[in-house]
Amino acid sequence: MSEFVMPSLGADMESAVLMEWKVKEGDPVKKGEVIAEVETSKGVIEIEVFETGVVEKLLVEPETECKVGTPMALIRAEGEAAAEAPEAAGEPEAKSEPEAPPAEAPAEEAPEPRVSPEPSAEVRASPAARKRAAELGVELSELATGPEEVVHLEAVEAAAAKGTAAKPEPEEKAPEKKADEVPKEEVTPKAARKKEAPEKKAAQEDAMRQAIAAAMSRANAEIPHYYLSTPINMTPALEWLEQRNAGRGIRERVLPAALLIRAVVKALEHVPELNGFWRDGAAQTSESVNPGIAIALRRGGLITPALLEAQTLDLDGTMQALDDLITRTRSGKLRSSEMTRQTVTITNLGDLGVERVYGVIYPPQVSLVGLGRITEAPWAEGDALCVRKVMHATVAGDHRATDGRTGALFLDTLNDLLQNPEKLQ
């Protein structure tokens, strides 16, 4: 019998709320199967079981906050005998008087509000957020920034901390005031609500910002960073990609972002020292290349789920996996393995006009690859000066695990692959 505990889904995670069990007691489960959904500061994440067996007992009720490492279920291994039920211990215990109080417990809990006020019922919100909003008197409709926005637990608690009430008390005496005595803000309530909207949206992002800040503060304090950058002529790769996409439908085309991820993965296979972790005072290289892809969320914040086993994917497979990962990240359908198995981080801010990216390594990883904007720039080829499409690639390395020579070798390999894009098939 083994315990299934609340997993750590990032260096900045301390706890999460169990939203829903996907299994029940007695169900068989296989390694890698999703058995529950939890809500963290980064959104809703599906968590997987890491062994094959049978769910012996569920130890935690939905909508319960659990710290990392808290036992949540008991998993019986295949072939292991089932545990004897406590009720089989004997008749006297089954008929003993102490069982009476629990029978009355549901009556005491019944009055607890389970549904938000009527305006909130139309708002998309997680069960944990809906319950907490009812407890704190927070109006969910005041937190949603759009019809497709899902309100999460951290937004409710942040709003409560800032004093967002469930419903503002109506000012019954307001009509008695003379028009010239009423402040402009009271005469135009719609304008006032629009003015407050940015503050409510900011409250929604607070928890995630704090989590990111905590992780980055730790990284800056613990990791001795070094940075290297080099310009790369992207013209050969982009022309090759354009020819490859010719005649393909929109859904079958490969975007430059996927081409760059594929190139980084191939380069890491040649320079594996940058693909791994710093743990227990030593560098550990990973056989799998699981790049964490920095993805901006519509509700604000940034998350870096892993593109698992990327070294096994060809260029088309990389494009399909990337598209799927972005879609599930923004709809809150990530799996715990995608939040815990990153071996390196890739951040591409080129679409925002940034030319060079100097990122902070996410512990316990030992490197981060930054990709900048592709721009037209003067480029010397032999004795001639011409205009080429150029991108600056940057690597941030952990000096405890590697040195500048390793980082330079990686950038040189990345450049060679992008000058010969047929190697990325």
Image (cartoon, rainbow, N blue to C red):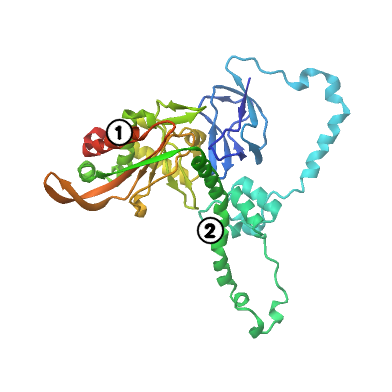
Residue reaching furthest right?
A: 97
Drawn side of residue 308 relative to residue 182, left or right? left
Instruction: Name the spot of residue 133 as percent of width and height, x first.
Output: 66, 52
Q: In which quarter of the image is the C terminus?
A: top left
The residue lying furthest to the left in this view is 383
Q: Which of marks 1 and 2 is in front?
A: 1
Q: Which of 162 and 184 is in front in this view?
A: 162
Nearer to the camera, 290 or 357: 357
Question: Alpha-carbon neighbours of circle 2 within 10 Å: few (<14), some, or many (≥20)?
Answer: some
* Residue 87 percent across, percent down from the top left: 77, 22
Q: Which residue position holds label 2?
A: 145
* Tag 1–tag 2 contact (CB < 8 Å): no
Q: Which of 163 and 29 is in front in this view?
A: 163
Residue 329: mark: none
Quick check: can you spot residue 135? Answer: yes
Quarter assignment of residue 347:
top left
Q: What is the count of numbered marks?
A: 2
Looking at the image, tell me whether mark 1 or mark 2 is earlier in sequence order.
Answer: 2
Label 1, on which residue? 409
Asked which quadrant contains residue 187, the reply is bottom right
Residue 260 drawn above or below residue 278: below
**How far across and down, in percent of the image, does residue 412 sit?**
27, 36
Amino acid, disc 1:
Leu
Query: Is residue 124 in view?
Result: no
Tell me the kind of residue under disc 2: Thr
Instruction: Name which quarter of the figure residue 11 lies in.
Output: top right
Q: In which quarter of the image is the N terminus?
A: top right
Question: What is the secondary structure assignment of the residue under circle 1?
Answer: helix
Q: What element carries label 2?
A: loop
